[in-house]
Image (cartoon, coloured by chain):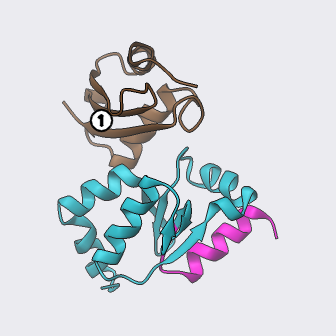
Amino acid sequence: MALPIEEIKKLISSSIPDATIEIEDLKGDSNHYAAKISSKLFNGISKIEQHKLVYKSLQGKMGKELHALSITTEGK
Amino acid sequence: MDAKLEIKNIITTNEVCLFMKGVPEAPQCGFSMAVSNILKHLNVNFKGVNVLENEEIRNAIKVYSDWPTIPQLYIKGEFVGGCDIIKEMYEKGELKELLKTKNLI
């Protein structure tokens, strides 16, 4: 099952409101994405914690509806 | 053995441990292959745990680290990251530094 880019952005924005999000559909199959996300919420926390915030915003879809999303995060 | 206990056991008895899909010699997923290749490139000895062979471990490792994806790298019992983080650490030289600091390379 595939998840469209707009849907992913909406999910991330709903729990990380100030997020600047760039998503690329790597294979044009709505199933392999690369996302670059920056937010003030990432300031001062570890990469693991940053990625966990993104995963949490996806509400359990990661690894299920969303097969592959590579994530790059940075603070603002 | 309880899966959580088994995980604890694996990551404490193996200093560098990669939970992955497939085995280091034959990874079965691009992300697992990427991390496995980085570790090989750094000449570090590591234990590969094939989660495709053990459904219980596959589920329990995600709960253990509160991390939804495979691969997962553990160094001296500590969760260090998944594919994206490990790649980034490798590119910045931080992974090599960490392994050196822990006397693993």
What's the magenta region? B1-18
Q: Is residue B54 magenta?
A: no
Residue ID at (43%, 34%): A53
Disc 1, SS: helix
Tell which chain the image draws in cyan: B
Q: Which residue is mark 1?
A: A42
Q: Position of residue B104 (x, y in %)?
A: 35, 84
Residue ID at (52%, 47%): B69
Q: Nearer the viewer, residue B97 or A44?
A: B97
The tint chain A carries is brown
Q: Quadrant of residue B95?
A: bottom left
Residue ID at (73%, 68%): B5
Q: Is residue B6 magenta?
A: yes
Q: Position of residue A42 (x, y in %)?
A: 30, 35
Residue ID at (49%, 59%): B72
**Chain of residue at mark 1:** A
**Amino acid type indicated by mark 1:** Phe
Q: Does A69 appear above or below B56?
A: above
Furthest-front residue in this view: A28
- Left or right side of A3 for A9: left
- Left or right side of B42 for A15: right
Label 1 crowd bin: few (<14), some (14–19), many (20+), radius 10 Å: many
Q: Position of residue B7 (x, y in %)?
A: 65, 67
